[in-house]
Image (cartoon, rainbow, N blue to C red):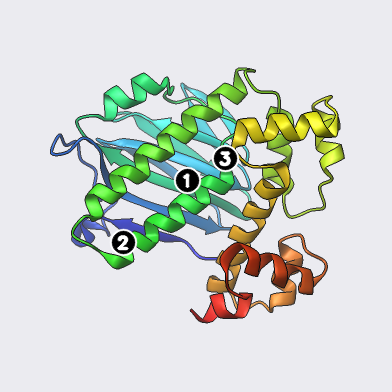
Amino acid sequence: MESKHYYYDITDASSGMACSRKSEDAPLIVNCFGRFYGNHRFSTNCMRKDYYLLILIEGSFDVNLNGKNEVIFPGTAIIFPPDEYYIYSKLQEENVYYLWVHFTGSYADTLIKDLGLPMNTVIKNVDCAHSVSAFENAFELTLKNSSFLDKELSVFINDLLIKTAKSLKLETGEKHIAKSLTLINESFSSDIAISELAKVENLSVSRYNYVFKKSMGVSPLKYITSLRINKAKYLLKNTDLKVSRIASECGYSDSHFFHRIFKNETEMTPGQYREN
């Protein structure tokens, strides 16, 4: 996998303040977005004029929130407000994968307030599968570069913020799958029995399946499969690993089974997806 990004103004992309702007030219405006994947150390200390949503998919790193350092883990998100420094760092050489998007617009303040989204606060139980898929779709939109791109990206950030707000309900106890969802997001490439997830939440398997689907819109198995297939897509596109190795990396010990699942989910074989 490799890092990837999009800037509305490519001529400014090399600047540390690229696309940093406030604007009321439209209700919601995506200034830039991307994904970071790497194992090198980094340190970020920056202030911008727009909002910044960060979603952690894999790994962990330190974030300074309200003067205190916190370690964030997969399945969490943070929204940094405009005109305030955001500070985070990774001091260990281990893989980390996060999604990021900077946005502005005349409706941004109102939307964030209406959704009850807090600033400079760790938001847990974020739907990683949905987030990864949303960013992948957004990248595909930029390749098409239609005359409606700005409007299409405004829908992207609107939906992403709504989905992030829904995860707050999990955190405040309105749903009862928070612990198991964190476990899934951290360990989806390993064998995860639904019975074990149900046990974590002190629920029967049937009750757990019901509550999970009502909360997330899909079954636990479908959610895990989505995470695995999204990871497989990135590995197929961005590495030279053999398909059998990718299957193993994504939690499938049987490569033939992986082929079948991948084709069911994408309507293509892994080889076709890599060549497409």
Which mark is nearer the camera, 1 or 2? 2
Which residue in the protein does label 2 denote?
142
- Neighbourhood count class around disc 1 (C-alpha, 10 Å): few under 14, some 14–19, many 20 upward: few
Q: Amino acid at mark 2?
A: Thr
- Neighbourhood count class around disc 2 (C-alpha, 10 Å): few under 14, some 14–19, many 20 upward: some
Q: Residue at x 63, y 47 (%)?
A: 59
**From the viewer's perspective, is 262 left or right of 42?**
right
Distance, label 1 to label 2, CA atoms, is: 28 Å
Residue 92 in view of the camera: yes
Residue 114: image location, x then y, percent: 36, 20
- Neighbourhood count class around disc 3 (C-alpha, 10 Å): few under 14, some 14–19, many 20 upward: many
Nearer-N-terminus badge (2/3): 3
Q: Image quarter for residue 115? A: top left
Q: Is residue 149 above or below residue 125?
A: below
Q: Amino acid at mark 1?
A: Ser
Q: Is residue 209 above or below residue 3?
A: above
Which residue in the protein does label 3 denote?
127
Q: Residue at x 71, y 61 (%)?
A: 250
**From the viewer's perspective, is 39 left or right of 206?**
left
Nearer-N-terminus badge (1/3): 1
Which mark is nearer the camera, 1 or 3? 3
**From the viewer's perspective, is 208 left or right of 59?**
right
**Which element type, helix, strand or loop, lies under badge 1?**
strand
**From the viewer's perspective, is 242 left or right of 204?**
left
Which residue in the protein does label 1 denote?
43
Q: Image quarter for residue 85? A: top left
Q: Is residue 113 above or below residue 207?
A: above
Residue 93 in view of the camera: no
Residue 153: image location, x then y, percent: 30, 49
Q: Considering depth in this image, is 66 or 82 the residue closer to the camera?
A: 82
